[in-house]
């Protein structure tokens, strides 16, 4: 990581320094800013918070939201929990993967809290309900 | 030109509410964004002078305004889905602008906090005990008893932590409350803080709920002076289901891996950063302003047996009329699914319902006379959990659902205890063998034994309750597990 990026990191760390339990808020911001949490970032954050690199690595690897590597594709989160299963999401998966054709990453998520109007998906912070094959396909195509 | 009310709840938005609102604005009308009534099959629901139209699209604007739209449902408040509800916690749903302090105060807001300060901290705790309120997150522990423990603890700092890590499929009541009536939760937390002597509060919201996080942040900022000296902060989860377990949530708040802690010590005595801490669900805390302002007795007058008050029940999955149904405990499962939910969306027969999230039992129609009550559900080998109901039609494969319960546990296990971490993986493998017809009798015995070990040996409800969906699927739907002998025959 270049010095510039570490500078940005310091800014993020400073923003949360006076909070109780600042690690998750810091990691959220780093993930949002850089798209992943690099090895250098882990070391830098560990040093700033007086933790070991292993402590920070352990936290990063525990949570689904934190990525150790930069994703190179747009991500669509598709809910495959019980309520969306009951509304037929499983029948959409194969075709969604075919439409994505490696251009869009389809991640499984368990529940978006829109459980009476599924199948549901989320892109960034925008939510999409009542998906069927064509609607989900169009959503994926729009990201690709 | 008319004034229209359209919800800005995430579900309404996911169904296109923003586009509908924009179309009304473009046509020169005034749009007010309000909370959702909870009739989700009608979202986006458009309200003009109390009359409803839904589900609306941007193309329906002209017809709705001139009264010719076939989407008309009549007066919203008189709709049968709403008319029979007993909305105490969700009294404002559909009626107020979520972050408007003016609307909140005009609808009885802050009166619970005012009364708490009037009667004092100790009497406030007693009031919550007398209401009979039990933890709405799923465990059903008496809320007031927890408060009394924290109140009696001596410490330089105490905390109020709101568990808003609503990860169960079919649950969205926490989300609706946080998005639709955030001040109600804030007031409930401020009352809790006053009652037990805690000056700091955290709301731990799952990251899948960005709309709720945004609303809460706005509301906390706007109400800072009103709840002072109590200070509140929102913290976002990071996509771990297990963080809905209270000790795992506390570890996560502290910036650690969301691993479960062994109890004792209980969080009420050794909680966040080792300090006495109340950890309550959103719905438990949001019930408190009513209990304080209207009195414990009025709340306790609702319900049955040891389940007092109301439960915001969530109807979801393959259901015709899905949404939020708050009612007194005691209503039967069948009434909820058939009469209120209207059966399935697909029109096929209801075969099974799962109550209480991914760790809740599957119920066949034969058990639809079970009343919604903590003890009655426990008696039927199930749990009401956070009050979510997923409806399945007759196309469901219950062996697949049982397998998914184990698979979900394996994916979401924090890894701290062996029965959950390894048992769930073995569970998937064993169910696969049964379905393939490999020595089904023996493998059923293994599965049952495994479930027994998980139930009794796991540290928390994730491993401990995963056997509920698995065993209930086996017990009530043995025909889906191949030509194997039923569970009872394997014993």
Image (cartoon, coloured by chain):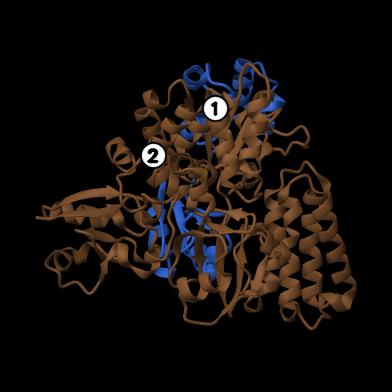
Q: Is residue B101 visible?
A: yes
Residue highlighted by disc 2: B215
Q: CA distance from mark 1 to mark 2?
A: 29 Å
Identified at 27% across, 48% down, the residue is: B33
Identified at 36% across, 57% down, the residue is: B37
Identified at 67% across, 63% down, the residue is: B377
B138 vs B487, left or right, is left
> Judging from the image, what is the letter of the chain drawn in blue?
A
Helix, strand or loop for disc 1? helix
Instruction: Return the x and y of residue B152 as percentages of the image width and height.
Output: 67, 26
Find chain B in the image and tell me its colour: brown
Label 2 Cα neighbours within 10 Å, binned few <14 / some 14-19 / many ≥20: some
Instruction: Return the x and y of residue B142 as percentages of the image width and height.
Output: 64, 44
Q: Is residue B15 above or below residue B184?
A: below
The quarter in which the C terminus of chain A is drawn is: bottom left
Point out which mark residue B121 bears: 1
B47 vs A122, left or right, is left
Mark 2 falls within which chain? B
Of labels 1 and 2, earlier in sequence is 1
């Amino acid at each position: 990581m270049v010095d510039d990026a570490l500078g940005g990191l310091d800014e993020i760390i400073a923003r949360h320094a006076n909070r109780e339990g600042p690690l998750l808020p810091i990691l959220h911001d780093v993930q949002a800013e850089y798209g992943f949490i690099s090895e250098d970032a882990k070391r830098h954050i560990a040093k700033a918070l007086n933790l070991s690199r292993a402590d920070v690595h352990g936290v990063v690897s525990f949570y689904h939201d934190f990525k150790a590597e930069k994703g190179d594709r747009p991500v669509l989160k598709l809910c495959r929990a019980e309520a969306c299963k009951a509304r037929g999401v499983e029948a959409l998966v194969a075709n969604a993967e075919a439409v994505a054709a490696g251009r869009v990453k389809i991640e499984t998520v368990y529940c978006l809290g829109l459980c009476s109007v599924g199948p549901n998906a989320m892109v960034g912070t925008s939510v999409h309900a009542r998906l069927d094959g064509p609607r989900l396909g169009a959503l994926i195509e729009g990201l690709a | 030109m008319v004034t229209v009310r359209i919800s800005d709840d995430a579900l309404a938005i996911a169904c296109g509410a923003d586009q509908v609102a924009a179309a009304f604005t473009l046509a020169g009308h005034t749009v007010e964004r309000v909370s959702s009534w909870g009739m989700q099959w009608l979202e986006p629901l458009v309200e003009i002078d109390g009359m409803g139209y839904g589900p609306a699209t941007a193309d329906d604007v002209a017809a709705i305004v001139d009264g010719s739209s076939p989407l008309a449902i009549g007066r919203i408040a008189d709709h049968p889905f709403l008319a029979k509800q007993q909305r105490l916690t969700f009294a404002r749903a559909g009626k107020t602008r979520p972050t408007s302090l003016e609307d909140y105060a005009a609808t009885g807001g802050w009166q619970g906090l005012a009364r708490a300060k009037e009667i004092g901290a100790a009497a406030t705790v007693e009031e919550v005990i007398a209401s009979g309120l039990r933890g709405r997150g799923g465990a059903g522990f008496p809320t007031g008893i927890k408060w009394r423990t924290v109140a009696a603890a001596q410490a330089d700092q105490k905390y109020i932590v709101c568990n808003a890590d609503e990860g169960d499929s079919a649950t969205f009541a926490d989300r609706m409350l946080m998005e639709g009536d955030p001040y109600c939760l804030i007031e409930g937390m401020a009352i809790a803080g006053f009652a037990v002597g805690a000056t700091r509060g955290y709301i731990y919201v799952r990251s899948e709920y960005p709309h709720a996080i945004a609303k809460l942040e706005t509301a906390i900022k706007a109400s800072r002076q009103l709840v002072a000296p109590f200070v509140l902060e929102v913290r976002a989860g990071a996509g771990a289901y297990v963080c809905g377990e209270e000790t795992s949530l506390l570890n996560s708040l502290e910036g650690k891996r969301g691993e479960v802690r062994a109890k004792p010590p209980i969080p009420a005595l050794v909680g966040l950063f080792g300090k006495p801490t109340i950890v309550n669900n959103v719905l438990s805390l949001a019930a408190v302003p009513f209990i304080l302002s209207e009195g414990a007795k009025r709340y306790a007058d609702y319900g049955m047996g040891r389940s007092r008050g109301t439960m915001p029940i969530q109807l979801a999955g393959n259901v015709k009329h899905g949404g939020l149904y708050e009612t007194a405990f005691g209503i039967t499962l069948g009434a909820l699914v058939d009469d209120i939910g209207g059966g399935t969306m697909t029109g096929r027969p209801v075969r099974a319902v799962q109550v209480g999230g991914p760790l809740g039992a599957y119920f066949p129609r034969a058990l639809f006379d079970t009343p919604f009550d903590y003890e009655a559900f426990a008696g039927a080998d199930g749990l009401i959990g956070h009050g979510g109901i997923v409806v399945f039609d007759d196309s469901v494969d219950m062996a697949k659902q049982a397998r998914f319960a184990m698979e979900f546990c394996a994916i979401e296990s924090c890894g701290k205890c062996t029965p959950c971490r390894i048992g769930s993986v073995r569970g998937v493998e064993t169910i696969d063998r049964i379905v393939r017809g490999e020595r089904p009798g023996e493998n059923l015995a293994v599965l049952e034994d495994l479930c027994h070990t998980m139930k009794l040996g796991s540290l928390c409800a994730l491993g401990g309750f995963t056997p509920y969906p698995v065993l209930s699927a086996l017990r009530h739907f043995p025909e889906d597990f191949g030509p194997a002998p039923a569970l009872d025959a394997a014993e």
